[in-house]
Amino acid sequence: MKYYRIRDYCLPLHVYPFRLEKFVGYYKDHYNNFVFSSSPVDIVFYGCGNNIVNASSDLQQLSISQIYLCNMRIGEKTKITGTVQMMFASSAIIGDSTVNTGSTEFFILDFNELSVGSDCLIGKGVQFQCGDGHPIFDIPTAECINMGVSSNFDHKNKTTIGNHVWIGTRATILSKSKVGSGSVVGACSVVNKVFPNNCVIAGNPAHIIRKDIAWNRSPVYELYPPVNAIDPQYIKMTEDLQ
């Protein structure tokens, strides 16, 4: 009985990294790697078919590494620092006006997809762990129990952060989890399931602490702007998940 992971595909051999340092502009090579960035960004490509589109965001302190057929889109007026590591056939979307207050680590592994909405606030040391880095096998059947993709590789595990979500310092967001728009994730929380809009979640594993909340970016000691100054689309009662 053998324990292995079947990969039934053919790819051009291109194992050496290709680096673009503080790159701005348009790039395309004969391996079909593609970049369009309006601000400087550090990029490392392995293999073929990788692409990055940065509309008009500040990525000067972000390092992106892609290995085979990865896709990343970054919206406008976003500012992210840290590292992004993407593996085979993974994808990531980060919306407009999303910022972090310190280095963030994004790990988006084979066949996983990450979507982070617009107007999000990400605390220092937050980690997105989309996918498992190593296989786990069931001994009696030799089946890989954490592969998470179908045999024809047409399914992606999706991790979703809604719009206007505040993720506290050193929180960890795990694969297949979802946080609804307008919610708050407590510091050091481990998020591993689906949560609704406009709630506070915290803990390991995370659970709902309070529902029917709204938040804004003003410091907590400031009395203004009042709650009615928050964008009305983010002032909603928490919906029950079915």
Image (cartoon, helix red, strand yellow):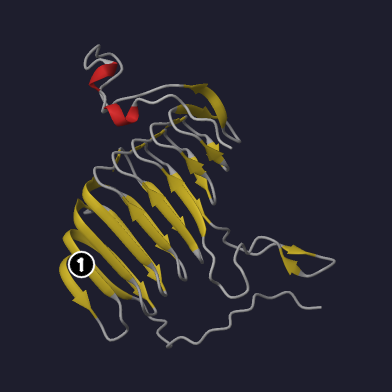
Badge 1 marks a residue whose secondary structure is: strand
Observer-nearest of 101 and 205 = 205
Residue 223 quadrant: top left
Q: Quadrant of the C terminus?
A: top right
Q: How many marks?
A: 1
| Residue ID at (54%, 57%) | 131
x and y percent of residue 82 in the render? 34, 51
Report the quarter where the N terminus lies: bottom right
Q: Nearer the viewer, residue 48 or 91?
A: 91
Locate residue 194 relative to residue 20 in the image: left or right: right
Q: Position of residue 213 (x, y in %)?
A: 41, 22
Residue type at numbered disc 1: Phe
Q: Is residue 93 above or below residue 127?
A: below
- For the point 61% across and 63% down, the residue is 134
Q: Is residue 82 above or below residue 146?
A: above
Indicate the position of residue 30 as horizontal and vertical percent values.
28, 86
Residue, x 45% and y 47% (percent of image)?
A: 160
Occupied quadrant, residue 40: bottom left
Q: Which residue is mark 1?
A: 36
Please give left or right for residue 23 compared with residue 121 in the image: left
**Residue 56's quadrant in the figure?**
bottom left
Extreme residue in the right direction: 140
